[in-house]
Image: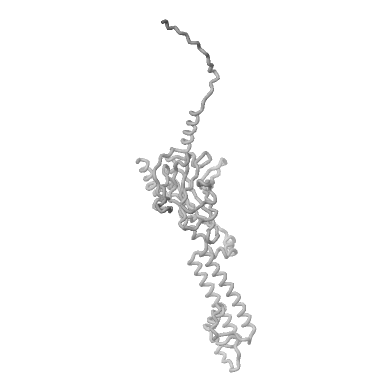
Amino acid sequence: MFKNLRKYFAIHLFGHSQRRARLVSKDGRCNIEFGNVETQSRLFFFVDIWTTVIDLKWRYKMTVFITVFLGSWFFFGLLWYAVAYIHKDLPEFRPSGNHTPCVENIKGLTSAFLFSLETQVTIGYGYRYVTEQCGTAVFLLVFQSILGVMISSFMCGAILAKISRPKKRAKTITFSKNAVISKRGGKLCLLIRVANLRKSLLIDSHIYGKLLRTTVTPEGETIILDQVDINFVVDAGNEHLFFISPLTIYHVIDHNSPFFHMAPENILQQDFELVVFLDGTVESTSATCQVRTSYVPEEVLWGYRFAPMVSKTKEGKYRVDFHNFGKTVVVDTPHCALCLYNEKDAKAWLKRGYDNPNFVLEEVSETDDTKM
């Protein structure tokens, strides 16, 4: 009971009074900003215009979408109006009865805009049309038609690419809110639970982690966000996961683990962030997808394990109860990984025998001193 109260106060009091900065939020967003970026470097975003447009938020993307189409229609409307003005097709020039205009029925800027709209989106009402009177109008018609197809292809492709991004598929992959530390297979492990909310699988799934912390080198250099590889596995390995039901992945805390010297008393004083990555290929679109989340010391529970959530019904079906997805239960756990290994070593030494070189076996003859 005292252990539960200590964990409760540590999370709710200490955790709220001193919030730790995260590089990766729980939903996978990166909390970082770039300062003092040169203007020349910012121009590279326009060089890679395709990626820039796809990465735009929807409100900005729709603004660009509407602006590009309206701008192109109005721009070519001005050009059609200029052609009619130069050829003296407008009513203010009072053309003669046998005058053949470049474009029929253009009376002003509004009608020129409407003709530009009809041309670019290939409506073709038939009231306004180009005649063979002037080659400039024919060239402008061909140029606007080709450019209109290019604009439509680019903008529609950008919207389709944004809709089909595997980033939305990552929303259906969820990690447990907390990580736990307990024994698994006779070893002290850090465990995390992950679930796929869709019935479609992630192909060639691979899971791994990075421990971010501030370290000081022997030369006195302070490295912020120093990255240490954390190997996560399931019972079948860490690659080609059969991700049909929730999985409990674990990291073995051995001598090479950065958690080896941690204990329940000092883990909250540690300054680290554990970032977990899950890479896979979406089965329906064959697009590569990455899901990530992070854990800070307050979210690592020592001496707990996850409650079971997979059961088998009487009908022979397997049932997954997501009510127990993030639920944890208290279990007996070693005080630290070093304690567990010392205990194992002590038991191993007790089972061994030792040779004493000074021990000599002598045979002693027994005499019967008992008199009858």
Is 87 on the left or on the right of 304, as rendered? right
Choose between 55 and 230: the one closer to the eye: 230
Report the coloring of the rendering: one colour
Q: In this view, does 343 lie above or below 68?
A: above
Q: Nearer the viewer, residue 103 or 202?
A: 202
Q: Quadrant of residue 42?
A: bottom right
Residue under the image location 54 percent in, 61 percent down: 285
Q: Residue at x 50, y 42 (%)?
A: 252
The total number of labels drawn is 0
Residue 371 sits in which quadrant?
A: top left
Q: Position of residue 180 (x, y in %)?
A: 44, 45
- Can you say whether 337 is above or below 225 in the image? above
Q: Could you tell me residue 59's position as x and y percent?
A: 48, 67
Corner quadrant of residue 41:
bottom right
Judge from the rendering whether residue 366 lies leftward or rightward of residue 150; answer left or right: left
Which image quarter is the N terminus in? Answer: top left
Left or right: where 80 falls relative to 265: right
Name the residue: 53% across, 67% down: 160
Q: Residue furthest front?
A: 372
Rendered location of residue 55, percent (x, y): 53, 62
Q: Nearer the viewer, residue 14 or 319?
A: 319
- Residue 156 visible in this rendered orientation of the protein: yes
Residues 177 and 369: in front is 369
Q: Quadrant of the C terminus?
A: top left
Q: Can you name the residue that lies furthest to the top here?
A: 371
**Residue lying at the far bottom of the rendered structure:** 97
Q: Can residue 226 be seen in this view?
A: no
